[in-house]
Amino acid sequence: MTNEEPNPPGLTQAEADPKYAFKASAFLAGVAGVSALFGFGATLSYVKKKDPTFFDKGVAMGPTLAESGAALATRALGWGTLYAVGGCSILFLSLWKLSGCNNLQEFRMKMGNNLPKIRKNDPPQSRTEFEGLSDLMRYLETWGSEEKQEKASSPLIVEAKSSSSSS
């Protein structure tokens, strides 16, 4: 038996438990991490079964390879990180200098005036809270079809011109 209390009426689990978002995020991160480790391990075991001689040559430095696969990957990751951080830093610094701002507040205001405005969805025009993934999927299946059904079910008003024919 659990000592958890049921949700108050009209409240979702996320609204009732303030730590729910953290728990859900931790769960999803854990599942993603375990999945990534399992996938990586499964791939390594498959490659080792498929061709053990080349797998061993890639893991340990040998006379045929100048550098092991792990060392090559580490070096590539280091260079990639350096290029990514350096490139983004140069981009952001050039945007800062071209804008002519002296501090972050001025930069924020200038960019806020130059970039398009984000419209507020207040009050929301559709559902924003779902009990679970299946509830979201059911909603997405019917989303938009409600408007089509309303248009289809509304009576089509056609005004016919009465023409008087003289015989």
Image (spheres, grey):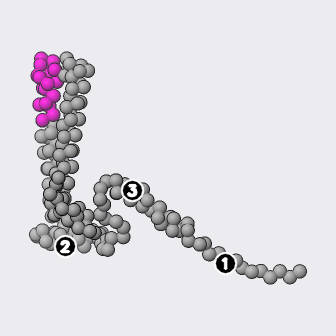
Among all residues in the image, which is located at the extreme front?
Answer: 1
Q: Which mark is residue 159?
A: 1
Determine the secondary structure under disc 3. Answer: helix
Give the residue type that dot 1 points to: Glu
Q: Earlier in the sequence, mark 2 or mark 1?
A: 2
Seen in the picture, residue 69 relative to 6 is either above or below; the reply is above
Among all residues in the image, which is located at the extreme right?
Answer: 167
Query: x and y percent of residue 71 in the render?
Result: 11, 31
In the image, taking residue 161 as reference, residue 24 lies left or right, namely left
Residues at circles 3 and 1 in contact by the CB criterion of under 8 Å:
no
Residue 5 seen in the current view? yes
Query: x and y percent of residue 107 in the render?
Result: 16, 69
User: Mark 2 and mark 1: span between their CA atoms?
Assistant: 55 Å
Residue where numbered disc 2 is placed:
109
Start-end of magenta stretch: 56-75
- Disc 1 residue crowd, few under 14, some 14–19, many 20+, Cα 10 Å: few
User: Mark 3 and mark 2: span between their CA atoms?
Assistant: 41 Å
Which residue is drawn at the image coordinates 14% and 50% (left, top)? 85
Foreground pick, 77 / 43: 43
Query: x and y percent of residue 164 in the render?
Result: 80, 82
User: To which quarter of the image does residue 32 belong?
Assistant: top left
Residue where numbered disc 3 is placed:
138
